[in-house]
Image: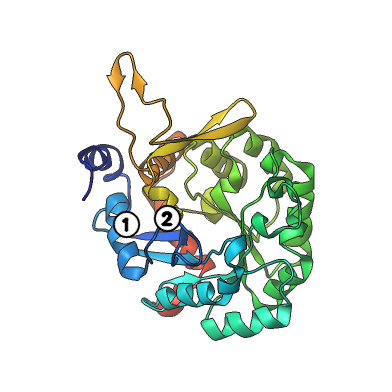
Amino acid sequence: MKATHDVEFFEREIDRFLPDRIYDAHTHIWKPEFYSFSDQSVDWTDYQSAMTSLHGTRPTYAMFIPFVGKDSLSYQLEANEWAAQQKDAHPYNRCNFFVKPEDDSDWILEHATRLGATGLKCYHHMANTSPTWEADIQAFLPEHQVRLCHEQNWFITLHIVKKDALANDANIECIRYYCQKYPQMQLILAHSARAFQPTHNLRGLPKLQGLPNLWFDSSANCEPMAHQAIFRILGHERFMYGCDYPVSHLRGRSLGVADSFLWLYEDTPVWGEKHAQINPVLVGLEHLRSLKWACWSEKLTENQIEDIFWNNAARLFHLEDEA
């Protein structure tokens, strides 16, 4: 059942902003044994139901990202198979294949091809680094996997880490190296390049100009300037909306502070002010409002907004093949 304040927020802030159809370029699908997002499995039908809180009745399709925790690696193949099954629910859907850094390219190719996956998902938790939040990209995305994506014309969804994200020289150097050496690989930097602190994008994005195979998804970043920096410095043409379900259905938002960021959740003791009791809305709604503000600030047209919510993903994921 939808909370009244979510519905009111959607109708007031979001509904008139969204185009007629939505492509979600970063969203998760799972069973509890793969990762404990919830104690129940989530399939295509569950996903569709959840998206009505964010998109209303608009047709929504997705690129599904499988995920496993370090304590459930024995389910890696099953998690990839589950994502592929949900991908098969509609011709517009896509999925990528979750990999560990030690996975052999031939093994990845065999199973990703069998499942119809057209990209890879790596994650810093799989790096042999402590803490993994400070891992080099190469520690969880080795070059042989990037080479495979170049050979297969696949994409990679990359959540960069290190405390200063794109303001970190090692991250910049690795991204440029991978994109330039492997031009048929398409690299997607998740969470608007993980610029939950937008100043990191302002510092790093100018150093990533001239890379036609570099893309971004917005996934749950609630800071308008993080998106706006991408639009202004690199252009909106390789920027895609992603809700990052199930994070989208928590309550609260990300917030840039100092030279870092924090997350405010429903149980964070900040919602009672002397003038009001605040009812936090879904992260996905805060995220959509941040996109609205970024598009307004950069004076994007309705057609350019449609690019973000559909056309750019359609080009990357070759949806025209299914038209």
Establish if 308 lies above or below 154.
above
Q: To which residue does mark 1 refer?
A: 51
Give the position of the C terminus as an image quadrant: bottom left
- What type is the residue that disc 2 sits on? Tyr
Q: Secondary structure at mark 1?
A: helix
C-alpha span from label 1 to label 2: 9 Å
Nearer to the camera, 1 or 62: 1
Establish if 9 lies above or below 20.
above
Q: Which mark is residue 275?
A: none
Q: Position of residue 15 (x, y in %)?
A: 27, 46
- Side of 294 where 9 appears, left or right: left
Residue 223 showing in the rendered view: yes
- What type is the residue that disc 1 sits on? Met
Q: Are marks 1 and 2 in contact (CB under 8 Å)?
A: yes
Q: Quadrant of residue 195?
A: top right
Q: Quadrant of residue 311?
A: bottom left
- Side of 154 where 284 appears, left or right: left
Q: To which residue does mark 2 refer?
A: 245
Q: How is the image coloured?
A: rainbow
What residue appears at the point 56 percent right and 86 percent down from the top-left corner?
114
Residue 20 showing in the rendered view: no
Q: Position of residue 270 (x, y in %)?
A: 41, 25
Nearer to the camera, 286 or 91: 286
Establish if 162 lies above or below 86.
above
- Is tag 1's residue or tag 2's residue first in the polypeptide sequence? 1
Q: Position of residue 85 (x, y in %)?
A: 43, 78
- Side of 172 where 307 appears, left or right: left
Q: Position of residue 252 (x, y in %)?
A: 40, 37
